[in-house]
Image (cartoon, rainbow, N blue to C red):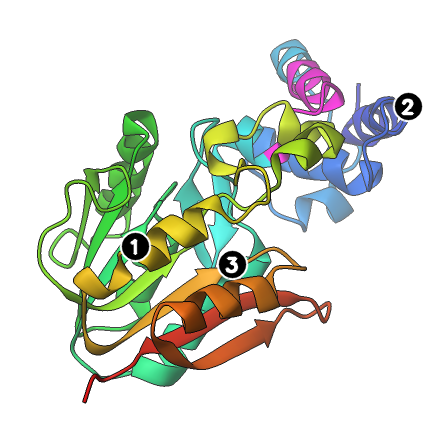
């Protein structure tokens, strides 16, 4: 079987199983398997695959047909131009989450800072900030020990062990000291919405990283309620939010002595990030 034949067969199978962009997905999975670049798929479509390559490719395609997310099949997801290890214990990084990192770069470049991240998952936010900003020390926490294994693997991969540390903690449970910024992409999907999500998400991504309680705001309340105990005077809090949660999270911040609140939209025009500053008490 040639590369061209394998791609055509795989694409048809993926499309039959309701995988969008089936042609590209077929190509990316074969590219991953063969470790070839894009030029190969232009100039070598008549390359004959070995029996082992055909068998392995079929296994990959079957996984994707079962709606196992592409990133869990390959074990890698790109974020902020960096590759991160991911698995089914960690949420797959999304492009919209890059807004948090971009906000940090824009507002705090060259400023020495102590940062707390709550709910690190794969560690992509903290590690990306550390790669982009030299004068930061970051403590990240997560309740999921298995996720922390992957996150610590990413710390080593990106060589930021000197400025990033991840520990197990249920929100602030094992956190000591004060910070200049608290950042978090907490679970924010309403409990009754989870069953309506795409199979790729609800069947494979960790429920711990999705379920935000009855109204999706549980973790925002918990983080904001005690934030002043862990923030330095004038410290900031920065959240990723659901597309319809901007005003609600803003109100929670106002009720808990935060000011200068910004709601930042993503490229699709939806509310995606909320940032606020703890008021300086007179």
Classed neighbour count for the residue bearing mark 3: other residues with Cα under 10 Å, few (<14), some (14–19), many (≥20): many
Looking at the rendered structure, which numbered label has been put on residue 97? Answer: 3
Quarter of the image for the C terminus: give it. bottom left
- Of circles 3 and 1, the one toward us is 1
Note whether 180 is above or below 45 in the view shown. below
Identify the element where label 2 is drawn.
helix
Residue 71, picture quadrant: top right
* Chain part drawn in magenta: 57-70
Q: Which comes before the other along the chain, label 3 or label 2?
A: 2
Looking at the rendered structure, which numbered label has been put on residue 16? Answer: 2
> How far apart are the two marked residues, 2 and 1, measured between alpha carbons?
41 Å
Quarter of the image for the N terminus: give it. top right
Classed neighbour count for the residue bearing mark 1: other residues with Cα under 10 Å, few (<14), some (14–19), many (≥20): many
Q: Are marks 3 and 2 in contact (CB under 8 Å)?
A: no
Instruction: Please tell me whether residue 230 belongs to the stretch shown in magenta.
Output: no
Q: Which comes before the other along the chain, label 3 or label 1?
A: 3
Q: Which residue is mark 1?
A: 117
Question: Horizontal and vertical percent for residue 258?
Answer: 36, 75
Instruction: Please tell me whether residue 60 belongs to the stretch shown in magenta.
Output: yes
Q: Which comes before the other along the chain, label 2 or label 1?
A: 2
């Amino acid at each position: 079987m040639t590369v061209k034949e394998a791609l055509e067969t795989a694409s048809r199978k993926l499309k039959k199983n309701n995988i969008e962009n089936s042609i590209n997905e077929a190509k990316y999975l074969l590219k991953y398997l063969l470790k070839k670049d894009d030029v190969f798929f232009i100039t070598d479509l008549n390359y004959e695959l070995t029996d082992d390559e055909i068998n392995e490719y079929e296994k990959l395609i079957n996984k994707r047909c079962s709606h196992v997310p592409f990133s869990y099949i390959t074990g890698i997801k790109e974020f902020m131009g960096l590759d991160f290890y991911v698995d089914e214990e960690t949420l797959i990084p999304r492009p919209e989450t890059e807004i948090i990192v971009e906000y940090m770069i824009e507002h705090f470049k060259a400023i020495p800072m102590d940062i707390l991240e709550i709910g690190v998952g794969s560690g992509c936010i903290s590690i990306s900030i550390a790669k982009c900003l030299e004068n930061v020390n970051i403590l990240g926490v997560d309740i999921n020990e298995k996720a922390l294994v992957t996150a610590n693997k990413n710390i080593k991969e990106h060589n930021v062990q000197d400025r990033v540390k991840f520990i197990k903690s249920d929100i602030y449970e094992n956190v000591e000291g004060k910070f200049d910024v608290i950042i978090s992409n907490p679970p924010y999907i309403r409990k009754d919405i989870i069953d309506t999500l795409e199979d790729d998400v609800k069947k494979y991504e960790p429920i711990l990283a999705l379920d935000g309680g009855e109204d999706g705001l549980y973790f925002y309340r918990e983080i904001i309620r005690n934030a002043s105990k862990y923030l330095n005077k004038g410290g900031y809090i920065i959240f990723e939010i659901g597309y319809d949660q901007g005003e609600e999270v803003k109100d929670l911040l106002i009720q808990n002595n935060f000011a200068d609140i910004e709601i930042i939209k993503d490229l699709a025009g939806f509310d995606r990030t909320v940032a606020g500053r703890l008021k300086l008490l007179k």
